[in-house]
Image: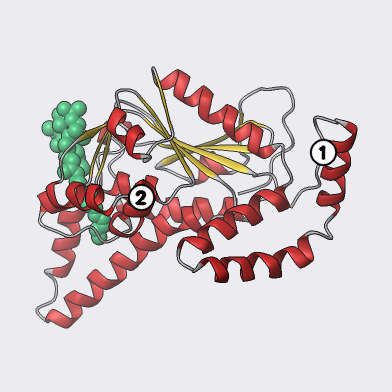
Amino acid sequence: MQPHRNNTSGHRQPAANATGHFKSLAISSPKPFVFHVELNRPKKLNAISREMWIEIKDCFEALAINPDCRAIVLSAAGKHFCAGIDLSSMMSMGEQMGEYDDVARKGVILERTIKLYQDSISSVERCPKPVIMAVHQACIGAGVDLITAADIRYSTQDAFFQVKEVDIGMAADVGSLQRLPKAIGSQSLARELCFTGRRFEAAEAERSGLVSRTFVDKDALLAGALALAEDIAGKSPIAIQTTKESMVYSLEHTNQEGLDHIRIINKLHLQSEDFAQAVAAQLTKDEKPVFAKL
Ligand SMILES: CC/C=C\C=C\CC(=O)SCCNC(=O)CCNC(=O)[C@H](O)C(C)(C)COP(=O)(O)OP(=O)(O)OC[C@H]1O[C@@H](n2cnc3c(N)ncnc32)[C@H](O)[C@@H]1OP(=O)(O)O
């Protein structure tokens, strides 16, 4: 993925090289330093095929190091946000395993596949740029895994969510069981949702903290998510990326470990030109300090 030129005109520009490169994702840069990633298998309700698992990982790993990207919105084309894993691609995996009689060899295929899919979802959390999910209509199974790896979740008022893995006879294994309880802050509700696979609507998702804002329709949702991304992209990339790193780290560490971690980073980052510039901008009431690329 090539860096694109700053777009201050407000025109929607394709991110150079990226739109042609990915088949299951559409990528653009609608505002300066903001990237928009769209799940783009609308005819398949954005069910996640093997190709899409790989492309999500490749895309977020590329955006992670792209200096023109400071915030990312992920939405989806078509009727639903995501119908979960592509059930037909699961059948093909079964066929591939059928080529072996030996259980250990079948196991190796499964282990490699699960690891690839876990890494795909985790690439969203590992990406140092804030990721905002914009969810409309159905967000099911692997869709929930995907959104819980993000920093911020917005949805339409008609969105609904289902941790549906138990209904296809499996325990979720790419992130929902680990991240959903932390996202909503209630083990009781998270376990209820994961044991039953019941559908929960946007209103309940907002009440429980899974989404932080709901919008009347998809257009309003995208406008809201992009405005938020633009706001974040205008701030110091050193400050924003360090904030994400510290908050992700602190999820799995004690308060003291989190404090030690940020102290070690900030003994370097408080010497950054971003810090001096941002403090000066506050003092002089300069509303739009310009920060160097990172
Ligand atoms: C290593 C493992 C890693 C990850 C594992 C993740 C597990 C999961 O993701 S579990 C969840 C799996 N997904 C589902 O069970 C979703 C099933 N689909 C639905 O519930 C509904 O289709 C819907 C998403 C709520 C949409 O409903 P509606 O708008 O009424 O459309 P439909 O008529 O039901 O569907 C249209 C068309 O799409 C096909 N389809 C739906 N979901 C999938 C899917 N996940 N994979 C493949 N195809 C899907 C559905 O069969 C229909 O096909 P037709 O050919 O048009 O009949």
Q: In this figure, which colouring scheme has been used for the structure?
A: secondary structure
Q: Residues within 10 Å of mark 1 (few under 14, many from 20)?
A: few
Q: How far from the left and from the top, in percent, is residue 252?
A: 45, 66
Which is more foreground, mark 2 or mark 1? 2
- The quarter of the picture where residue 171 lies is bottom left
Say above or below: 214 vs 18.
above
What secondary structure is marked by label 2? Answer: loop
- The quarter of the picture where residue 14 lies is top right
Asked if disc 2 and disc 1 are in contact, CB closer than 8 Å, the reply is no
Between 127 and 210, the one nearer to me in the picture: 210
What secondary structure is marked by label 1? Answer: loop
Say above or below: 140 vs 175.
above
Q: How far from the left and from the top, in percent, is residue 179?
A: 36, 55
Ligand 1's quadrant? top left
Say above or below: 41 vs 216.
below
Q: Which mark is residue 185?
A: 2
Say above or below: 153 vs 175.
above
- The quarter of the picture where residue 117 lies is bottom left
Question: Which label's residue is closer to the chain start, 2 or 1?
Answer: 2
The residue pinned by badge 1 equals: 290
Q: Residue at x 72, y 53 (%)?
A: 238
Horizontal side, residue 29 vs residue 222: left or right? right
Horizontal side, residue 82 vs residue 165: left or right? right
